[in-house]
Image (cartoon, rainbow, N blue to C red):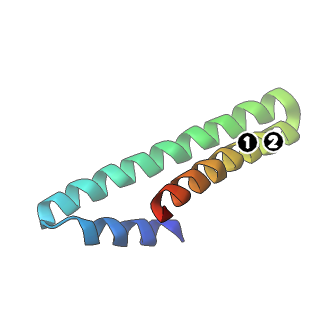
Amino acid sequence: MVEPLATGYLHHRIGSSSMRATIDSFQSLAMNAVMVATGLGFGYFSSLLAIFGGFCFLGVVCAIYAGWYLLVSRRISD
């Protein structure tokens, strides 16, 4: 759900089509890097602390994202 919204926002803000392709490539790279890091963290903590540790790691990742989202959304609305 987030990816189409972010892509639409970026396309609206960026004028030239060559810059759109570059930004799309960097967005894809960043999203894939975050997914790889999250998957590796889940696997590491699952092997270290059983499956509960993996899901605790995902909970921490979600809490960090929620905190960042709240800070950014308040800054934009002010």
Q: Position of residue 8 (x, y in %)?
A: 35, 72
Is 60 left, or right, of 18 in this rendering? right
Closer to the observer: label 1 or label 2?
1
Q: Quadrant of residue 56?
A: top right
Residue matched to label 1: 60
Question: Dot 1: what SS?
Answer: helix
Q: Amino acid at mark 1?
A: Val
What is the total number of numbered labels drawn onto the structure image?
2
- Which residue is at the front of the view, 48 or 21? 21
Residue for point 58% across, 55% down: 69
Is 41 left, or right, of 13 in this rendering? right
User: Do callouts 1 and 2 mark residues in contact (Cβ within 8 Å)?
Assistant: yes
Q: Where is 73 relative to 4, above or below?
A: above
Measure how far apart labels 1 and 2 are at the Cα level. 6 Å
Is 24 left, or right, of 62 in this rendering? left
Q: Quadrant of the N terminus?
A: bottom right
Residues packed near mark 2 inside 10 Å, few (<14), some (14 to 19) or many (20 plus): some
Is 37 left, or right, of 12 in this rendering? right
Residue for point 29% across, 59% down: 24
- Which residue is at the front of the view, 15 or 72? 72
Q: Position of residue 48 (x, y in %)?
A: 81, 27
Question: Dot 2: what SS?
Answer: helix
Q: Position of residue 51 (x, y in %)?
A: 85, 41
Q: Position of residue 38 (x, y in %)?
A: 61, 42
Residue matched to label 2: 56
Q: Where is 17 relative to 22, above or below?
A: below
Residues packed near mark 1 inside 10 Å, few (<14), some (14 to 19) or many (20 plus): few
Residue for point 87% across, 41% down: 52
Q: Report the residue that reaches farthest toward the front.
A: 78
- Which residue is at the front of the view, 40 or 78? 78
Q: Amino acid at mark 2?
A: Cys
